Image (cartoon, helix red, strand yellow):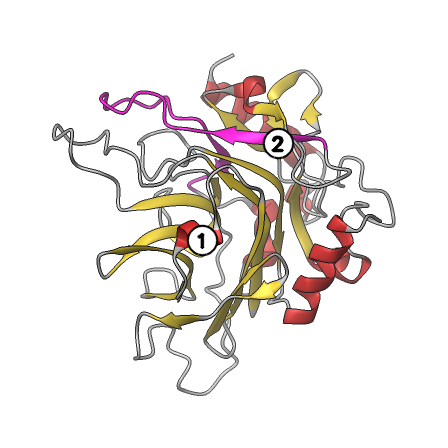
Amino acid sequence: MSRTRRVAAATAAVLAAGVLAGVAAPPASAGRAGPRDVHPSLRENLVAFYDFDHPVPGDVALERDQGRSGTEIELVNGGAAMRVADRAYAGSGRALQTRQVEPAVAGNDDWKAGIFSASGVRTLRPFNAVAGTTVMGWFKVGMTAPRPNSNTADPNDLFNAIGLAGVLTGDSDGHGVRALLELIDVSGELRLVALGRRLDGGDSQTFAAAEDWRTLLPEGQWVHLAATFDFATGTMALYRNGRPVDGFYTRTDDPWRVGGPGPHVTTASDPRGIKIGGSYPQDTREQNPCDCRMDSLMFLDRALSARDVESQYRHMVRGR
C-alpha cells in the first residue's frame, strides 16, 4: 500500500472511531490510569504520546498514540525498520530512528515521522485555541552538525537546523510550527531552541539555550528534553534531564502579540499535524533531517511548570 493510501486508510479508521462526532479515539493501551511511563499529574493533559512499542495491527509503518487523542503517526520511508532496540531509560522498549538517506539527491526518502492533513488533524483539536503547550521526550543525536542540504546542488550547503519534534500550525505547509523543539542557527551558531508561534500566519518567537548544544546533547547519549510554551504570557522555557536550561529570547519585541487585552491563546484552528525528525511529514520535501533516536515523545495541552517537568523526568528514571 502506498504512503498516501496508508495515511488515508488510517485517517478513515480514526474518523470511524468517533472523531467526526468530536470524540477522539481512545488510546491504544493506556488504560484508565494512563500510560505507566507518564506521571499521574500529567495524564489529563497528555494529548499524544509515542513510545514506539505499539505498531498499528496490520500496518507496522503506523504507530499508535498512547495519549488521549488517538492520533496515529506514520514512520515515513523507513517503516518498521525505524523501530530499533535501544533504551532511553530503564523500562523503555524500542526507540525511533530517523536519518538522512541520500544527501546528494533531491528526493523524498529521509526517515522521519509524523502526520499531516491540509484540512487539519481533528484529533489534535486540544491544540486549537490553547493557552499552553509542552513538547518533550528522549533524544540521542548521532551527528555533530546539520546534514547536507539535499535541495541544492552545492555539496557544501548545509541545512540550517536539525528537527526534533513539534506541533504544526493550522495553516502549515508541513514546516511551519505552533510549538517545536529543535536545533537551529541563531546568529551564526547552532543552538538548542524552543520555537513557538501563537497565531497562524504570525511571527514566531525563539528561546535559545545559552550553553553549547553539543554539551547539552552529547553525540550518542540519551538526554531528556522539554520545551514549554505559555501563549497566555508570551513565555517559553527549556529543560534538560528535568532541570531548567539558561537561555535567551531572540526577539525583544512582541511577536506573539500578547501586549494587549487577553485572553491570549493560539489561533482557533486544528493543527495540520505533528513532525518528528525533520519537516514535511507528508513527504513532499526534505528539510532539517535528524540522524537521531527518539523515545517517549509527549505532546501536552498545558505549559508545564519546572516542577512538573522534573517530576516526569524522575518518574521515568527512577521507575514507576
Vertical position of residue 280 compared to residue 102: above or below: below
Q: Are there few (<14), some (14-19), or many (20+) residues within 10 Å of tag 2? A: many
Instruction: Say what amino acid the circle numbered 2 marks.
Output: Ala
- Name the residue: 76% across, 35% down: 28
- Indicate the secondary structure of the residue bearing disc 1: helix
- Of all residues, the one furthest to the right in this rendering is 32
Residue 80 in the image, given as x and y percentages of width and height? 58, 19
Q: Which mark is residue 215?
A: 1
Q: Which residues are magenta?
A: 93-118
Q: Quick one: 109 or 212, which is closer to the camera?
A: 212
Q: Quick one: 157 or 286, which is closer to the camera?
A: 157
- Name the residue: 42% across, 41% down: 118
Residue 38 in the image, given as x and y percentages of width and height? 75, 51
Q: Which residue is mark 2?
A: 95
Whether residue 295 appears in magenta in the rendering, the answer is no
Vertical position of residue 219 compared to residue 255: above or below: above
Residue 143 in the image, given as x and y percentages of width and height? 39, 36
- Name the residue: 69% across, 54% down: 46
Is any part of residue 92 visible from this angle? yes
Instruction: Say what amino acid the circle numbered 1 marks.
Output: Thr
